[in-house]
Amino acid sequence: MDTTSKGWNLHWTMGSAGIVGVTTVAAGLGLWYFNLGRKRLQKLKDRQPICMIRNPDAPHKLRLLELSEEFLKEHPDLKVMSMGQYLSQLQINILSNDISMEDVPDIIREQIDTALTAALISGLGPAFGTAVLPLLGFLPTEGAIFSMISAALISATMGSALTDHEQDSTDRGSFPLTVAMLGNGADIYATSDRHRMREPVDLNEPKPDSSLGKWNVGEVAYDPHFGMKFGEKAVAADDSQKDESKQLIPNPFIVSEHFDKAIEGMEENIRLARGEYNGASRSLGTPTLVNETLLPDLYAGWGDAQCTHTQREIVRNRLFCCLLNRLGHNFHISAQKLKGEDTNLQQFVVKMKPKDKDIIKPQDFVKALVDNGHKISTCPRGATTTFGASFCVKENDGSWTTIPTAFFLQSGYESAKGKPAHFFMPHSGLDMDITGPLVGPNPDGTAGRCNIQYYLAIEGMAGWHSNHNSDVPWIRPNDLQNPYKGSEMFRSVTFAAMAALTLNTIATDMSLPNGGYGLTGVCNDTCAVLEVAMCGTTNCHPISYSGRFLMHTSRYAVNLATALSKDRS
């Protein structure tokens, strides 16, 4: 297969099912494989019958995740290589006299499978990695992703480089699922396991670990988080008696008094929890060696690439997200009252200054920011997703060469010649870009950045999230529509809050795992809904709602719209 798209020249398919996320099906398998992988990795460390030697000057014989010439010409200073080029540089060295040449392919497969899985789970984190990797085909089964890498490595080291004909026969080695099959699988699983998921839920007092509870805290996947107190390393076991004066985000939150203080408090909490913190750093962390015996010089990480935002800018992103999410949660309180429910949940209030009027809606907060000198726009955007996974090669001079990676999905379509059409998996969301007094310049004089994004996250919450990424050209976002400004921008913020209310309520009420991620949709679906609401059409793909849960969310949204039409307050 030879398809060029946004700088990629895709000669092999690597993966097929990740972003559409049937995480409910795969999480158990992932945890099992994670534990198995650790045992196998220790076993291989004790018994390493073969090793590889890397020759950087070896000819480029293998074609695996190759980069297009156009992409390389656009970025002449970018130090990158393809996975195929790296594998072409490896030469086998048998360490044990007990190993026959017939055993080599099986040994390579076993070591590749274990080493790369361990590296990716380490990079993605056990919670995220064990949910996502099985969906990408990272399972010890015939046809899994790593089998293609090991097949290529075996072919090279055994002296038979792959031909184009052989590549055509192996490009079906990805996990053989399509978008439609994924939706059906999620629906079947949820239906058969309905009795387990369905437990009595009190929406008037949702649990902290529910989607509504997380929305009320304001953020997910961060520790320490903004729901904590000043000087707190971890959440207290019993925090029922909140002292608002000690909260990083007190209620009411007065921007002129609390905004900078909250950022400084979070930075101090990070120092307490991690032992160090550099607000000006854009570091993406130190790459970790995958397996020095089998994959010499290959590391999991981004090499010397930097983050798009400094650590302090990320903290500021998070604070804006928390304020918008907690204001959005006020819609849940209103929805309960419209249904005649008696809730003890306290409405969250923001004031720009102590004597200013109360702000209880996210769109009103955005309007207040604009009135106070900020420039704000929103825009649906999509980009290639790597799930945070990346590989790089450490050269003899200590420099890094990055191996661009992406995961690919079978579209279900074919070319005129009968070849399956694949596409790289995207991540999409509604971006919000903010400049103005609260963002300001950085201490070094450079322009400050504030970029956040609305989407449904696999950690179990639909809402706003910090939009920082690795600053590399192959995952930079593309506009899916023209940016929304003025009244259109305010309307998009309102729609985002309504969509988040719907998704988080359904996920909480039905006790859906991962906040309904993969059942009520994924990031692309949440972006597509907003696009359709704003423009009547969407450029997001794939759309992966499962039919059953689409009906649940649609029914809730219709009922909510009916209730709101009767009460405009």
Image (cartoon, grey):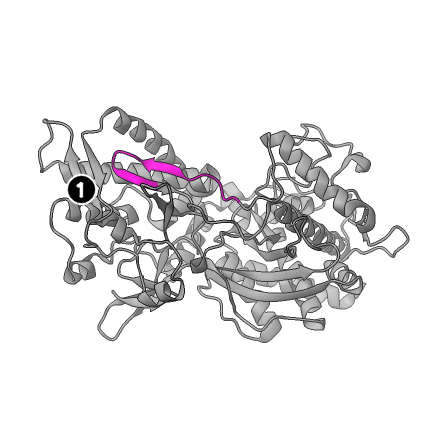
Q: Residue at x 67, y 38 (%)?
A: 267
Instruction: Please report the residue visible at 57 percent of the width from the left and 54 percent of the height from the top.
Output: 467
Give the residue number, with chain letter if any, for mark 1: 91
Q: Quadrant of residue 82?
A: bottom left
Q: Position of residue 469 (x, y in %)?
A: 52, 52
In the image, 149: left or right of 441?
left
Q: SS at mark 1?
A: strand
**Does the magenta-highlighted stretch encompass residue 24?**
no
Give the residue type at disc 1: Gln
The residue furthest top is: 46
Q: Quadrant of the C terminus?
A: bottom right
| 39 or 205, nearer to the observer | 39
Residue 399 x, y percent position in the rendering: 38, 44
Residue drawn at (44%, 54%) of the image: 187
Left or right of 400: which side holds 13? left
Q: Measuring from the top left, give residue 377's x and y in whole percent.
A: 66, 66
**Is 473 located above or below residue 395 in the figure?**
below
Residue nearest the observer in this picture, 522 or 206 = 522
Q: Is residue 292 magenta?
A: yes
Within 10 angstroms of label 1, few (less than 14), some, or many (20 or more) residues?
some
Report the front residue among 476 and 338. 476
Residue 136 x/y as whole percent: 36, 50
Vertical side of 109 occupied by 96: above or below: above
Give the residues in magenta: 283-298
